[in-house]
Image (spheres, rainbow, N blue to C red):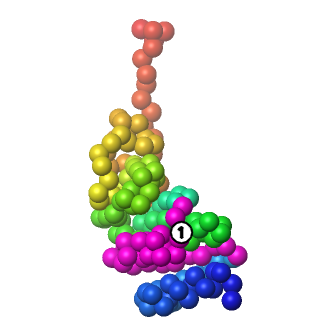
Amino acid sequence: MTNEENIQKELSTRFDFLSDKIKLQRPRRIFVEVPAEKFSEVLEFAIKGMNFSILCAITGYDDGLKLNFLYHLASDEGIVLSLRINAPREKPLIKTVTKYFPSADLYERELMDLLGAQVEGLPAGRRYPLPEDWPQGEYPLRKDWKMDTEVKEVETDEQS
């Protein structure tokens, strides 16, 4: 049995609701669809019980129906475990993981700015990566977002 298969078995045994939600994508890549309400429990077990102690990235995307968030964790053996949760587009509430990974705040701010995620427990801070004067409620990575195409004439000294 490979390391990936052992991880799959351990997760399925510990969390029976994951038994058909684990996909061994290729060597050293495991994807797991986790119910949002069970995410904290699965994440903590992955970190403390399975030694996935490195946060590689948090990514998010809009599939048109819901927002998806992937937490890419790595072990010292080089296996990457990607835990995916989803949230309704109308109220995309997720919990911060800065308790385990303090550097996650930048990823989480990115999810807030670009997709409109509400990150519960994230301390107040500067926006990232959008500028402070970016309009509230405008999330450029959402499928339904449209750039304002109105061209505003900028007055210059030459026009005066």
SS category of the residue bearing label 1 = loop
On the picture, is 13 further left or further right than 40?
right
Residue located 42% across and 52% down the image:
102
- Residue 44, quarter of picture: bottom left
**Residue closest to the eye, 41 or 34:** 41
Percent from the top left, x then y, of residue 141?
A: 47, 54
Dot 1 alpha-carbon crowd within 10 angstroms: few under 14, some 14 to 19, many 20 or more: many
**Residue closest to the eye, 149 or 48:** 48
Q: What amino acid type is highlighted by mark number 1?
A: Phe
On the picture, is 145 further left or further right than 119?
right
- Asked if residue 45 is among those painted magenta in the image, a careful observer would answer yes
Q: Say if residue 11 shows up in the picture.
A: yes
* Rendered position, 23 above or below 79: below
- Residue 15, quarter of picture: bottom left
Location of the C terminus by quadrant is top left
- Asked if residue 108 is among those painted magenta in the image, a careful observer would answer no
* Rendered position, 145 above or below 10: above
**Residue closest to the eye, 17 or 3:** 3
Task: Tell me the residue that label 1 is attached to.
Answer: 52
* Rendered position, 10 above or below 152: below
Residue located 62% across and 66% down the image:
76
On the picture, is 54 further left or further right than 154?
right
- Residue 67, quarter of picture: bottom left
Percent from the top left, x then y, of residue 116?
A: 36, 55
Percent from the top left, x then y, of residue 45?
A: 44, 76
Percent from the top left, x then y, of residue 25?
A: 65, 77
* Rendered position, 58 above or below 51: above
Chain part drawn in magenta: 27-54
Residue located 30% across and 49% down the image:
123
